Amino acid sequence: MKIIACIKRVPTTDLQPRVAADGKSLDAAGVQYMTSFYDEIAVEEAIKQKEKHGGEVTVLTIGSAEASKEVREALAKGADKGVILVDNAWGGRDPLATAKTLAGKITELGADLVLLGRVGTDRDNASVGPMLAALLGWACVTDVVGLELGDGKGTARREADAGTETYAFALPAVITCQKDLNEPRYAGLKGIMAAKKKPLEESPCPPATSQVEIEKLALPPARKAGRIVGEGAAAVPALIDALRNEAKIL
Amino acid sequence: MSTIVVFVEHAAGAPRRGSQEALGAASALGATVVAVLCGNGADAAAAQCGKFGAARAVVLDATAWSPDSAAIGVAALVRAEKASAFLASATSSGRDVAPRVAALLDCTLFSDCTALRKDGEKLVVTRPWLAGKLDATLRSSAPVLCATLRRNMFAVKETGGTAAVSKGPALGPGKAVLEKIEARAGGKLDVAEAPVVVSGGRGLKEAPNFALLEDLASAFGNAAVGASRAVVDAGWRPHSEQVGQTGKTVSPQLYIAVGISGAIQHLAGMKTSKVIVAINKDPEAPIFKLADYGIVGDAFEIVPALAQAVRKIKAQG
């Protein structure tokens, strides 16, 4: 089985962001990066499915060459090769541009299964996976918490508002991964050493046109200062009074 | 502003709340609103879309639910209507279908928008980045502005109008097809949908103590239980309840944080809530900086007292 796991390098989730002087971009000073949380789950699932069904896992990303750190981490965990589509202006891509570029490369590489995180923890679009599937004309299940494959088809359990949905689909397919799908492994020393010898292709990326113009980036307005209404259960009447008569929501 | 197509989800013969909000948002922009509903049994809900601002409602019949075939049908309708915008609620289905519709229209998608405004004939959207740590104000140069709208951020408008209901082409067989749904136990509300969220963290000490929060939620009646990442990682609560950067972003009318100190990733996921109440034994907990009202003390005493007080008020009507 040919499996491609798509990952994105994003700011760490503990970032307290600052807006740059232009008012339109993130101040890059001091920003640390990591593989997007859900993409780690996609990488893990790719390796698990390979371990079960055989085949090969390619880790694919769009970004600067610095993303080789995150790609090597995936190789250390058990992916077989890495591809970085080098675009130093990757931060300005909209999800459609990203999906189109990935669709082109995936068509070139060939795949039975493409795995992505359900959402990138930077722009929170949750769009690239289903867009990619629509462009490729493939099946796609999003927010997947359980995946079974076999014989050119599969079933996936999806976490939905009303409960868990089960979908049947034929391969090739795009799956976006939700947290409960698996527990990402840590890379061992042996894996880290092996990763250094695994192929990592850096190829230039076709320039992207974005349909999104950033007018303004701002910290959300500060909330009005609140107050401590009291201590212990004795403060409950004061809280109820505030909710009823000040906030008027009870 | 010309026509806006709104993807309307339905349950029990009525448009779902998030879809009602999306219809309200579209009609507030002064557009001709066309609702599109998929699947069998959508006819009754379609007739009701007029009440929430739709001029017309189009039903695309389907024998089984498939997000890919739904997207193809909806995208064809958006094209046929020459719509200037396509909106859906940022529900699990909305977020599943809308990106596909957008891609089929060769348009990008603005996900989980918290505000929409008109600037001449153009729409300007506001949406969170980094799970709400930043607000991005964005303009679109896409042929059709495609957006999903965060729940509880747009007003439902009961217009008393009627929508002309028609049938569009039935949806084709899909590539991924829904086989079964295991409903959440007891028909519980989703944490992203509920008007009141009662969330717990490490301060509850162990998993069984979440019964206190379940009880408080049931006192409100329209509440869902949420959880911090710490307790989800500890296996006390399912990930579907996690609020924060690697969980759900919520904007309820009332958010009650119990025993949650307030890691930045958690605060990002709930700080657009209308009213925030924090209950924590540590007066220095960061959650108090964000809360409108705080009680310092033992959650095991405060929460039952609060549940009792809420029940009393609800009983008085």
Image (spheres, coloured by chain):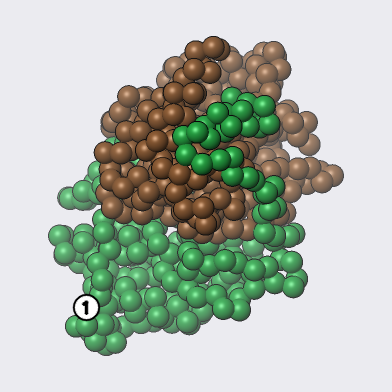
Chain colours: A green, B brown
Q: Nearer the viewer, residue B169 or A30?
A: A30
Q: Residue at x 48, y 82 (%)?
A: A65
- Residue B48 falls in which quadrant of the image? top right
Q: Is residue B111 left or right of residue B65?
A: right
Residue A150, position in %: x, y?
A: 17, 50
Q: Nearer the viewer, residue B221 or A180?
A: B221
Q: Residue at x 65, y 21 (%)?
A: B52
Q: In the rendered image of this protein, does residue B246 appear above or below residue B302? A: below
Mark 1 residue element: loop
Task: Give the crowd class for mark 1: few <14, some 14-19, many >=20 residues within 10 Å.
Answer: few
Quadrant of the drawing holding the N terminus of chain B: top right
Q: In the rendered image of this protein, does residue A29 appear above or below residue A242? A: below
Confirm whether residue A37 shows in the render. Answer: yes
Q: Total of numbered circles in the picture?
A: 1
What's the residue type where badge 1 is placed?
Answer: Gly
Q: In the rendered image of this protein, does residue A126 appear above or below residue B209? A: below
Q: Is residue B140 left or right of residue B215?
A: right
Q: Nearer the viewer, residue A249 or A42?
A: A249
Q: Is residue B289 left or right of residue B178?
A: right
Q: Chain of mark 1?
A: A
Q: Residue at x 74, y 59 (%)?
A: A215
Quadrant of the drawing holding the C terminus of chain B: top right
Confirm whether residue B144 shows in the render. Answer: no
- Circle 1 sits on which residue? A188
Residue B53, position in %: x, y?
A: 68, 22
Q: Is residue B159 left or right of residue B274?
A: right
Residue B75, position in %: x, y?
A: 56, 39
Q: In the rendered image of this protein, does residue A178 appear above or below residue A26? A: above
Q: Residue at x 41, y 69 (%)?
A: A35
Q: Nearer the viewer, residue B71 or B131?
A: B131
- Residue A27 falls in which quadrant of the image? bottom right
Residue A56, position in %: x, y?
A: 24, 69
